[in-house]
Image (spheres, rainbow, N blue to C red):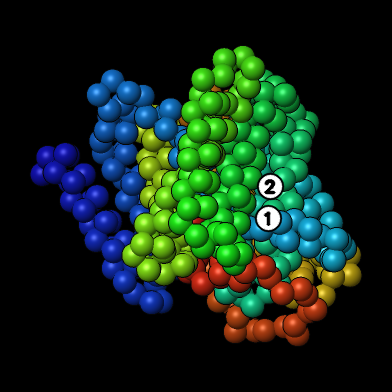
Amino acid sequence: MPEATMGLILVVTLALVALAFLCHPTLRSVAFTAWVFTFVAAAMVWPAGFMTWFGFDLKFLIVPLIQIIMFGMGTTLSAADFTRVLAMPGPVVVGIVLQYTVMPFVGFGLAAAFRFEPEVAAGVILIGSAPGGVASNVINYLARCNVPLSVTMTAISTLISPVMTPLMMKLLAGRHVEISFVKMMLDICNMIIVPVVAGLVANRVLYGRERPFQRASVLIGILLASLAVAAGVWLVPAPLLGALQGGLILGFALVGVAVLAKLVVVILLRGPKNWMDRALPVLSMAAICFIIAIITARSADDLKRVGAALLAAAMLHNLLGYCLGYWGARALRLNVVDARTVAVEVGMQNGGMASGLAMYTLNSAKAALAAAIFGPWQNVSGSILASWWRRRPALPSPGLAPSPATAALPVQAPSTKPDCLP
């Protein structure tokens, strides 16, 4: 049988398996991983199809796709998710400290133990230096952990990532690849912080119960203003805004799109108010799969050579994150529920951000391989861990009620909230 035919059969089979998983209530939690395997197989069989389209290099889509994913993350957050740290500073500080110590240093140790080449080693350290991923919030909900603590940890770790991620990379990966602290910091602000802030604004407009946000005239005004600002930023000379220009343009444009969608879906068609919660997870899953395919197409030979070792490293990295996160939190006197929450937050990383930084900042498809493998694996392990803990509930810990947006977040199944990864 010709190799091309075998490849086609493999991709079609994997796609059918992914669809079957998506339709099965028990296997739905691993449907995202099945789709990732499908896209990886497609990229291995037809690498040219994920390299360029009509002369356009597809790697330039990675950053905008990640910005869209992070905008989606922002729409699940509110200001309360950031200020909640004032109400429970102890668990949040413990979790953040473990997040930015356990995972980077474990990544450094694994890169040395497996003797990865410099760029691959830098990628392993990079996924360890990333903030928590939004999928951890859903896993914590399924595990019956402290969801407000989980959401706040994700929000705060993301907020400080422009400083902490370049710092840990400079400290631990500087001998493998050249790290520019300032460039990486600005790239994170452009790729992560600006879209998340735009998502927060969209959250206010989409979910705000104030009467003005229910009036079509006000929404039209917000729509026109956001699009006008996006156009204005587009016209500003690039040197004035630097690396932030792309994020600002897309951020304001996405706010406009979200407002327009609310006008059409909610105001005109009287559709469900939580339409964004239904649409963005699917879009995020598709974007992550496409990003992984683009990375795979550029590093297929490297994936064949070090893929098994990287998978083993990712599994160990993830497992040690869970274990050290839990026992570190217990050693610092957190109760069982909060320690479980911290364990999930520490063990699950923002693979989308790591992929984007590897491709855009480090300009290395090899460095992006670790995130491409770690991201799907953590969704599988997280689902297994959530099922285990759900059957063995701990005593509930005191916590604050989540904000309306946070309360809506756990409705999504883990497979529909990939790490945005993500």
Quick one: 260 or 109, which is closer to the camera?
Answer: 260
Q: Where is residue 52 in the image (x, y as percent from the top left)?
A: 31, 26
Q: Position of residue 69 (x, y in %)?
A: 50, 47
The secondary element bearing badge 2 is classed as helix
Identify the disc placed on residue 298.
Answer: none
Mark 1 burial class by Cα count in 10 Å: few <14, some 14-19, many 20+: many
Q: Find disc 1 in the rendering and name its residue.
A: 154
How many marks overall? 2
The residue shown at (63%, 22%) is 241
Q: Is residue 52 left or right of residue 327?
A: left
Q: Is residue 211 left or right of 223 when viewed as pictured?
A: right
Quadrant location, the N terminus: top left
Residue drawn at x 51%, y 72% as measured from the top left: 411
Residue 231 vs 143, above or below: the answer is above
Q: Specify the amino acid type for callout 1.
A: Thr
Q: Are marks 2 and 1 in contact (CB under 8 Å)?
A: yes
Q: Nearer the viewer, residue 188 or 144?
A: 188
The residue under label 2 is 158
Residue at mark 2 to residue at mark 1: CA–CA distance? 6 Å
Q: Is residue 147 above or below residue 104?
A: below
